[in-house]
Amino acid sequence: MERALPMKGGNTKPFLIREVGNSGALDVCVPTKSGGWKVSFTVEPYDFDWEDFVPLNWLSSTLPESHARVNKAAHSRCTPDRPSSSSVVSVASLGTLTVGNCAAVSTTPSKPRSRLPVDGTNKGSCRSRSRGYLHRRRQAQQALTMGSRSRPPLYQDVNGIRLPHGFDPAKLLSCLEYKASAGDIFIDTFPKCGTNWTKRIVQLLVGENSAQESDYGLSTSFFEMVGKDVIAALPEPRIITTHLPYELLPKHPQAKYIYVVRNPKDCCVSYYHHTKKTKLYNFEDGTFDEYLRLFIDGATSFGDYFGHLVSWYPHVQEPNVLFLTYEGMKKDPGAAVLKIAKFVGVKDPELLSVDSPKFQEVVQNSSVDCMKEYLNTNYKKALGDQDPENWTAKKDYPLSRPPPPPEVMVRKGIIGDWKNHFNEEQSRAIEGAFVQKCGHVVEHTKLWDPEDWIQVA
């Protein structure tokens, strides 16, 4: 069966799939300069549907050098330089296909391949080898699934930045070229650390002219989602939310930067539920223990929580940086709103007085309950009359996938939900990771009260 593999720039590269005798294996062939076909790699037999093996609709939206992850059945954690046990198939100009549950892939077709005869000879030997392969594969799968399935959520990798599928890699790359200006207010957090909450506060403080109320998920200025052109077209003051680490963020001495950090346990719990409920990650049956391991390893969407904090902490005393903790904002939202109002240069005296009705209205309208209502209203606007299961991308919405439901964006918004998820061993593991990865830069006691996140024996 012949297919066309989408390539960068809208071009396609044809490839041919052919069975290898009666062995059940498949050859994936690419064209040669002489007009023939050569084997690029071989897929050994297992129970897969070929239509699931090469997801053309995913590959077409992914740069060739990125990873297209196929989340069917069990997945193996892998890297491009470790094709052993066949989780990764590197195919030169075809890019890198990350294929879960597809072992024993040959990436060196120039070697003798007599064990897989194309002409169908020696069929019995092939079937015997096939059965042996399947037995070894089952053993490997059992080993992988003992204690952990080791199946990560679905991501794409763009120049070392891990993104959810549905994001346009070109828009992310354009962000790195954006020229910041004095009219920019950047809100930078690791995911699930108060991004939308902080942005809503800023929106309410600086006025509706800076926010498009009809856009779902407060995403009009989500940097990595919309790209530099959409950001540049926004009126000042531009409110720009981002998850980029400090070193990748555009800088300007008069721009303002708000950084919010949340304790890693609550962040991990919230991010786990977000990933589990967001269909584009294909992690609906993932367990918390599996996700915690990814979180500690920095293998979640948008990278490493600990590295993100380490990138920002040395800059928290700079005059155009406001450093906040999620826990501090929750314990005294009025004080947090006042800090933000002064930092962004609010002139209205009523918005600088905690006792004024106008100030209290900002506090109330940025509460968890109001945020849920706000997101639910805009979710319905974004969907229109469409069914989320049969979503058609719209010009005025930046994702190719349907918007996530409101409960994914704002869940509980509390301190200490980690106590409902972590056992003692898991707590010690993430506490140790914080000390190991962040201890040389910041003491956790400077950020949070120990009772908010430290496991009590």
Image (cartoon, rainbow, N blue to C red):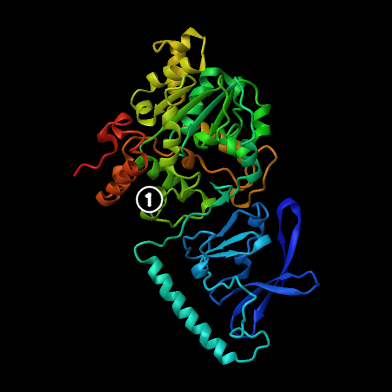
* Residue that carries the numbered disc 1 in the rendered image: 292
Q: How many marks?
A: 1
Camera-side residue: 388 or 340? 340
On the question of residue 156 being in view, the answer is: yes
Q: Quadrant of the C terminus?
A: top left
Q: Is residue 297 left or right of residue 247?
A: left
Query: Can you say whether 41 is above or below 148 in the image?
Result: below
The residue furthest right is 34
> Is residue 451 left or right of 310 when viewed as pictured?
left
- Residue shown at 43% from the left, 41% from the top: 307
Tell me if I can see residue 368 in this picture.
Answer: no
Q: Image quarter for residue 20?
A: bottom right
The structure residue drawn at horizontal position 68% and vertical position 60%, both measured from the top left corner, is 93
Residue 316: quadrant of the picture? top left
Secondary element under disc 1, as helix, strand or loop, is: helix
**Residue depicted at x 29% and y 43%:** 419
Nearer the observer, 165 or 390: 165
Amino acid at pointer 1: Leu
The residue depicted at 47 percent of the width and 9 percent of the height is: 350
Residue 235, position as x, y percentages in the image: 65, 22
Other-residue count near label 1 (Cα within 10 Å), few / some / many at <14 / 14–19 / ≥20 = many
Image spot of residue 315 (x, y percent): 45, 27
Q: Does 196 sit above or below residue 307?
A: above
Q: Quadrant of the N terminus?
A: bottom right
Q: Nearer the viewer, residue 405 or 314?
A: 314
